[in-house]
Image (spheres, rainbow, N blue to C red):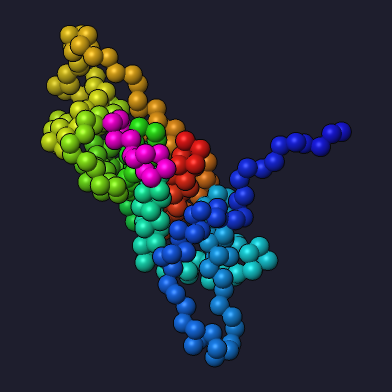
Amino acid sequence: MSEATTTRKMDYFRLPRPIWRKLKKYLPKQNQKKKSQGGRPRASDRAVANAIWYVLWTGWQWKALHKDYFGVSSSVVHERFQRWRRMGLFEKLMRRMAEYYAKERGGIGWGWQAMDSKHSAAPLGGEKVGNNPTDRGKLGAKMNLLVDEQGAPISVILTGANRHDKVCAVDLIVSMMPKRPAHKEQHLCADKAYDSEDVREFACAAGYETHIKANPRRKGSQRPTEEGFSKKVYPARRWVVERTISWLTKRRSLRTRWAKKAENWLALIQLACSHILLNLAVFG
């Protein structure tokens, strides 16, 4: 039998070098005096980053990480992950990767933007968790995402599964990481869950031309007339955000939220978004 010619493209045990280089710039510098005092050597930041990367992809429990995997105990990995999260390292990393993506691709694709959300079960409960109306009232959380025309994530927020998408639309636009130019023509696409006059008015005030699918169940919902379609026909642009969400959910820790702290789960999402921004910057 001939050997397989294909190789594994993703290394789940090692954080990609470009992301590590940018993350390392935000890490606190170690005191040289403490190193000379002896004692147990400090665990490597690189090894801890690799362990966090492994947890992101596999959905592994923090306490189940064995020291033989990365040379670092599970308690050290989790403690340092929370410390980095409190320092805002993962948010800074995502912002830095968005700048890198804009530099490599000639700028953010502001012309067409799309937003959507993804429900995830949250069996352990915790912060920003609610009863999911689409899953028999079980506890769940929701990640809300806004992407550019290439599918690059530029804004992400967390809410409970019981919170309506139209309530999160304003927060998505306001919490956008890159600074959005106001003078360029920009279109915003969304599905019928965002069909609300408040969302349309805020988006128009922010300089968007909205393309939100009308919800036939909503009272007073008005569908675009045929005369409006005859002037200019726009292709479907909402699929890019759905593709980005599918990229995110390839990572098992984002399919089900086991973290009780919403900030911990958001940090993992920001790390995953940083990787997607890297892939889009390099491969397009």
Q: Which residues are magenta?
A: 102-115
On the image, which quarter does residue 93 sit in? bottom left
Residue 121's spot in the image, x, y percent? 44, 45
Residue 202's spot in the image, x, y percent? 15, 37
Residue 134 visible to the viewer: no
Q: Residue at x 53, y 46 (%)?
A: 252
Reply above or below: 238 against 141: above
Q: Is residue 183 left or right of residue 3?
A: left
Q: Is residue 33 left or right of residue 194?
A: right
Reply above or below: 199 against 232: below
On the image, which quarter does residue 281 sit in? top left
Q: Residue at x 29, y 47 (%)?
A: 178
Residue, far bottom: 37
Examine the structure image and report whether residue 108 is included in the region drawn in magenta: yes
Residue 146's spot in the image, x, y percent? 32, 39
Figure quadrant of the N terminus: top right
Residue 45 visible to the viewer: yes
Q: Residue at x 56, y 77 (%)?
A: 42
Q: Residue at x 34, y 40 (%)?
A: 107
Q: Is residue 159 left or right of residue 2?
A: left
| Total number of numbered discs in the rendering | 0
Examine the structure image and report whether residue 89 is included in the region drawn in magenta: no
Reply above or below: 185 against 41: above
Q: Is residue 73 left or right of residue 90?
A: right
Residue 105's spot in the image, x, y percent? 40, 39
Name the one closer to the observer, 135 or 225. 225
Name the one closer to the observer, 12 or 134. 12
Reply above or below: 38 against 71: below
Name the one closer to the observer, 231 or 213. 231
